Amino acid sequence: MAPRPETPGLFAAAAPRPLADRLRPASLAEVVGQDHLLAPDRPLGRMVAARRLASLILWGPPGTGKTTIARLLAAATDLQFEPLSAVFSGVADLRRVFQAAEARRSGGAAAGTLLFIDEIHRFNRAQQDAFLPYVESGTVTLVGATTENPSFELNPALLSRTQVLVLHRLDAAALETLAGRAERTLGRPLPVDPDARAALIAMADGDGRALINLCEALVAAAPDRPFDVAGLAQVVQRRAPLYDKAQESHYNLISALHKSLRGSDPDAGLYWLARMLAGGEDPRYLLRRLVRFASEDVGLADPAALTQALAASEAYERLGSPEGELAIAQLVIYLGTAPKSNAAYVALKAATKAAKQTGSLMPPAHILNAPTRLMSELGYGAGYQYDHDCPDAFSGQNYFPEGMERARFYRPTGRGFEAQLGRRLDHWAALRRARG
């Protein structure tokens, strides 16, 4: 029997390379959007020119070139590139790399080792500590990539031995450069009209890899005529906005919302509110922060602000999402346009400081409660003047502890309702001096 012809193996033919891999820069000069690090007079440019690379943490959003830059730095400084992912690697993998680096070093090889750790923040504290002696001795040059704030996610000891460099999200010009490269590699223009091309750049949201994948999907669709904006939306999906409710973006955006309202910019406040809602933020968290804002930053300049905040919270509880989100938007507009005062916030801090300094001073005897005869005989309540029986319903008595000088904690601003409160307090102060 004649032998059967051999069936080609499943992987006999090389799988086609994704466009993102084919467009990976071959030199640091081809990296887009990171000139603040790679220009000749900037940190990485100077290191490459001196051929002395420090251990680094590359911090930036996805699709900004962290992995590519690490690989190209190794090539530019003649270091052996050893890549690991903190998602898939463990102590055994680290030990293997360290042993190879030590052997390379002890064998007299000219090349050192660049250990690249993708998603380095996913290593636990003990695993991060494992790097320290090898980084300290120069056995490896560590380059870690992370999308999370290193200050929160990495050990202080590791941070002290590395330089943290921040990569920027790609701007429209950098993304347009990548789109042009994609067209040249694919050998055809992207099948989009000018408006759809602008929408495509916006869809990528600063992520170069996402843009290249979108370009590849568009060309694969092979339309009869260029897509307009509506057609583009049917073929490719907008990249989900970067937002992690438990990580730095959460704190950055709530800070932006708070400070926009403090700066009396309701339009910016609405934008940050919409960004957080689109990212899946819990509306109840937003409402708690806005209730706090009503007291901290508006205060008695507009006493209705706190009422509005509580009403918005109740409205949301009754309506839920998405209907109740309109009440949050209304509250953001109200707080952004309200007169501002932090006088109550400052007053509480000052009073708290005084309370800690003065200890357990007793109230003056005339304002002590005297429910029993013994307490009356001890002088509790003696000499108390009932303010409603006094002219102007104001006695002017002292209510601070004996032995403590009268203090002025609350100093109203001249804005909104607090202007009226200021005049009232000044009037009482004058009466107190006259009757003192």
Image (spheres, rainbow, N blue to C red):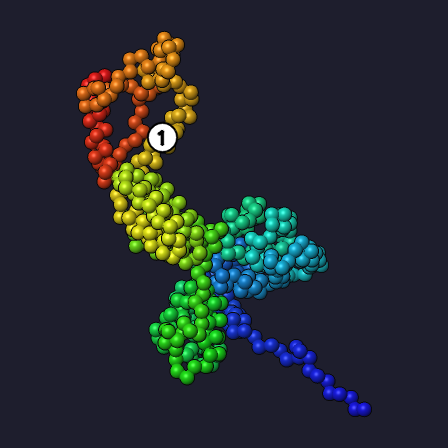
- Look at the image and tell me whether residue 263 can be seen: no
* Residue depicted at x 22% and y 36%: 419
* Residue depicted at x 33% and y 32%: 347
Residue that carries the numbered disc 1 in the rendered image:
350
* Residue depicted at x 30% and y 31%: 410
Q: Nearer the viewer, residue 429 or 27?
A: 429
Quadrant that contains the N terminus: bottom right
- Look at the image and tell me whether residue 398 can be seen: yes
- Residue 156: quarter of image: top right
70 to the left or right of 363: right
Q: Is residue 78 above or below residue 195?
A: above
Q: Nearer the viewer, residue 65 or 430?
A: 430
Q: Nearer the viewer, residue 355 or 29?
A: 355
Percent coordinates x, y for residue 430 in the rendering: 20, 23
- Disc 1 marks a residue whose amino acid type is Ala
Q: Is residue 260 above or below residue 348?
A: below
Which residue, as the protein is rendered here, is positioned at the far top? 377
Which residue, as the protein is rendered here, is positioned at the far bottom? 1
Quadrant that contains the C terminus: top left
- Residue 231: quarter of image: bottom left
Mark 1 secondary-structure assignment: helix
239 to the left or right of 124: left
Q: Is residue 318 above or below residue 385?
A: below
* Residue depicted at x 68% and y 61%: 109
110 to the left or right of 354: right
Which residue, as the protein is rendered here, is positioned at the far right? 1
Q: Is residue 217 above or below residue 51?
A: below
Percent coordinates x, y for residue 413 in the rendering: 25, 36
